[in-house]
Image: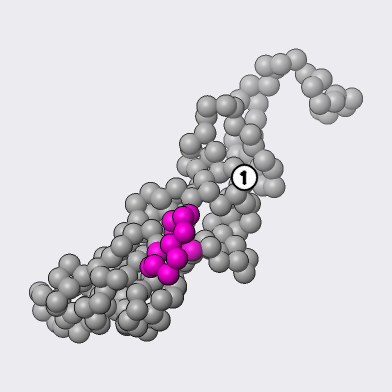
Amino acid sequence: GTITGITTGGLPDGSIAAGDLASSLDLTGKTVTLPSGTGGKILQVKTTIYDTFTSEACTANANNELNFNVTITPASSSNKIIISSSIMGQWNSTNNHNSMYTVNRKIGLTNNYLSPSGDVSSRNRGLVVGGSLLESDIGSSHCQYSIANYLDSPNTTSEITYIPTIRIGTNAMTWYYNQNATAGDSGNYERGVSWITVMEVAG
């Protein structure tokens, strides 16, 4: 039957056990506060894998956003986002040692390219530096940019789009996704996959 007249706190503490709850609780739109010391749990994981073989002309001294991204909506503004990403490909120029890799934390129309918090003046900036494994060979040596477990604090419950971004130096170049610039067909030429993964961690 139905019991009426009970208000919040009207039942004795401990009178409802876990077995009394529904097997699946829908907490959509609710905020759950964890007890002190129980943070750090992974709440959700989002990933995007990009395996297309294509190219993109990149502008010098600018943030060049790549062709793929991942979105996540934090459950609480106090939660953190762990970012992991790996970008495979190659430049068409030996000037690739000037390149930096970062991620744009985009909320609405606001861009925030993650980089050092201090004054960098006109210097190139980002999270990690990248370059060809063999700079003098723009035909058969690939380039790799990787971020492993960067902890971001977006301080929002709005949807966030994380966009892989490469910032190059004073020379414009063309980036070839997941392949070599000359795309030869032999064991000396590589093909690969790029991806970005974000995980929300309870604060």
Residue marked by disc 1: 76
Q: Is residue 67 left or right of residue 51?
A: right
Residue 102, given in percent of the width and then of the height, sits at 41, 63
Residue 92, given in percent of the width and then of the height, sits at 25, 82
Could you tell me what secondary structure mostly forms the magenta stretch?
Answer: loop
Magenta-colored stretch includes residue 123:
yes
In this view, the residue in front, 108 or 186, is 108
In this view, the residue in front, 123 or 108, is 123
Q: Quadrant of the C terminus?
A: top right
Q: Is residue 119 left or right of residue 50?
A: right
- Residue 153, placed above or below residue 186: above
Q: Quadrant of residue 143?
A: bottom left
Residue at x 52% of width, y 45% of height: 80
What element does badge 1 sit on?
loop
Q: Quadrant of the N terminus?
A: top right
Residue range in magenta is 113-125
